[in-house]
Image: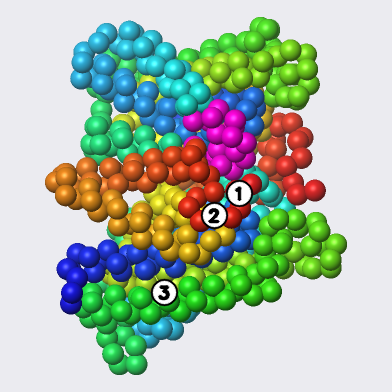
Amino acid sequence: MIISAYQTHIFILIFIYIILAVSLNLALGYTGLLNLGHVAFYGIGAYTSALLAIEGMPYLAAMIIAGLFASVFGYLLVTATDRLKGDYLAMATLGFSFVVYSLLLNLREITRGAMGIPGIPKPSILGLTVRTNDQYLIFVLLICAISVFIMYRIVKSPFGKLLEANRDNAVCLRVLGKNTFGLKYKAMMISAFFAGISGSLYAHYITFIDPTSFYISELILILTIVIVGGLASIKGSIVATAVIIYVPEILRTLDLPSSVLGPVRQALYAAILIAILMLRPRGIFGKVDLE
Amino acid sequence: MSLLAQSIINGLITGSIYALVAAGYSLIYSTNNFMHFAHGISVVAAGYMVYWLFTLAGTPFYVTCIITVILSALFGLAMYRLIYLPLQRKGASNVILLIASIGILTFFQNVIQIAFGSGVKLIGYIEVAKGITFAGITMTLLQIVILVISFIIFIMLYQFMQRTKLGRNMRAVSNNKELASIVGINHIRVSDFSFLIGSGLAGVAGILVALEQNLSPLMGTNLMIKGFTGAVIGGINYVPGSIVGSFLLGLAENLGILVLPSGYKDAIAFSMLFLFLLFKPNGILGKKEGRFDK
């Protein structure tokens, strides 16, 4: 390969996070759903896929079921938070992240709690096993391209326009006889589905997951990506993912001890998030404001 | 029987720490109307301040406490003046402020982790850690001190809100910002004071947490969720309500683990938070203020 093993690793992460960020943008940017529970869908997808694959299910089936299962939770979350809006909706969805996190931590019989799940098998499709990281990069790139293409087609479709109309003025849309609640359900379920897919890709790449991978620090990272890239901009989310995952790698050249590197990176993400909110709340390519 | 009584006492002790967090939080919420999630980091920062001044630098304990409370209050004011107020002036929505505050919380958690390491820190102020057993209930002197101090603070806070001019102004702004402005109340000044007092309370909570539990950089999120949950249960925009709610949460957690495995303590709190936000977002005692999609 032309790129180093470490860069391969970074690129794999970038492609996984692109799916995650674009799917969050579908809910947050295009539909205006203030979902701070996205990281829970990601975790649900990762655990579902990992547990099914360990039980011997073929990878593709496990991945799709992971997406569908996350999607079911997306449906439940909208059902539950239907009546809330603004910061109360944001807090309730954040509460959903906490509930899922503590369930992952406490349902020890299923999730092994804080010990996490080791030995998640590498994907194997039609007898071909993805063994090396180079092969995984190609595999992830493929899934990422398909996912982003589907989401791109969704937001450009008449349905996507309805989502944006719902975000901008739900009452007007209802006057026109559209079912705005139905739109919210569909958007959240699609968004959760792809979050579940990216969770699955993450779990089978790292081969070990534990609940801390799906908590506040992850949430800050994907929120930063979506807000920096700009709401309602798929292009923005893709560019921002690449920049925000890649740039902190410069920190590695500073030769910091690894115990400090993680917190420095997290602090940097949080600082970028605050800075972009203060300086340019629409992000790089954003078209709408967060309300 | 004594197990039940012990659980109730433990619930009250935990509840009083949650209540200190929640009281400050809901004081800030009621006058500013946005979720200051970074309140949790004021508590943790105060805890580490105690560790730094008292355990590492050897400052006398009471001097440490006074400095810590003052610095926490100023830390809160700085967050308001340097981040929230500029954002509000640019017309940022409550959601942006909430996201910014989660950002602040994460930022300082990691700064503390860089400065002090991720390991658990002990304050080592052992004079008060002796256990006293009375009628089958064991309490440490420190726990009695926590209960007494928090009750004194709650009474002072209530008197302050009811009797003083500033307290009345705060309630006026919390009730109706526009009307308060019309009668000449400067709401930014009121916000300044709500951040000073609220974060000062966080400082007190931080000192007590530091003495009662061990310090770790990531405890802020958990404390914030607990304080926030307490506030939501009791009524987030009503300070006495959020104090009552926090005690209820402390009791629910400690009574809940009589029947559930102890790991479920957090799950009890998170589920209560989620359920209250969904079904009773104004809490038990909170003011009826429509937050629903009309």
The correct choice, above or below, for B262 with respect to A49 in the image is above
Q: Is residue B91 magenta?
A: yes
Which quadrant would residue B211 be assigned to in this image? top left
Disc 1 packing (10 Å; few <14; some 14–19; many ≥20): some
Q: Position of residue B93 (x, y in %)?
A: 62, 40
> Which residue carries the number 1 mark?
A289
Q: Is residue B259 magenta?
A: no
| Dot 1 and dot 2 residues touching (CB under 8 Å) | yes
Disc 2 packing (10 Å; few <14; some 14–19; many ≥20): many
Q: Position of residue B152 (x, y in %)?
A: 53, 12
Q: Which mark sits nearer the N-terminus, 3 or 1?
A: 3
Which region is colored magenta?
B83-103
Label 2: chain letter = A
Which quadrant would residue A125 be assigned to in this image? bottom left
In the displayed structure, does residue A19 sit left or right of residue B151? Answer: left
Q: Are marks 3 and 2 on the same chain?
A: yes
The correct choice, above or below, for A220 with respect to A210 in the image is above
Comparing B264 with B272, the one in front is B272
Q: Amino acid at mark 3?
A: Cys
Residue shown at 48%/73% (left/top)?
A148
Comparing B25 with A85, the one in front is A85
> Which residue carries the number 2 mark?
A286
Residue at disc 1, secondary structure: loop
> Which residue carries the number 3 mark?
A144
Which quadrant would residue A10 be assigned to in this image? bottom left
The correct choice, above or below, for B57 with respect to B102 in the image is above
Q: Marks 1 and 2, Cα distance to the nearest angstrom?
A: 8 Å
Q: Marks 3 and 1, Cα distance to the nearest angstrom?
A: 27 Å
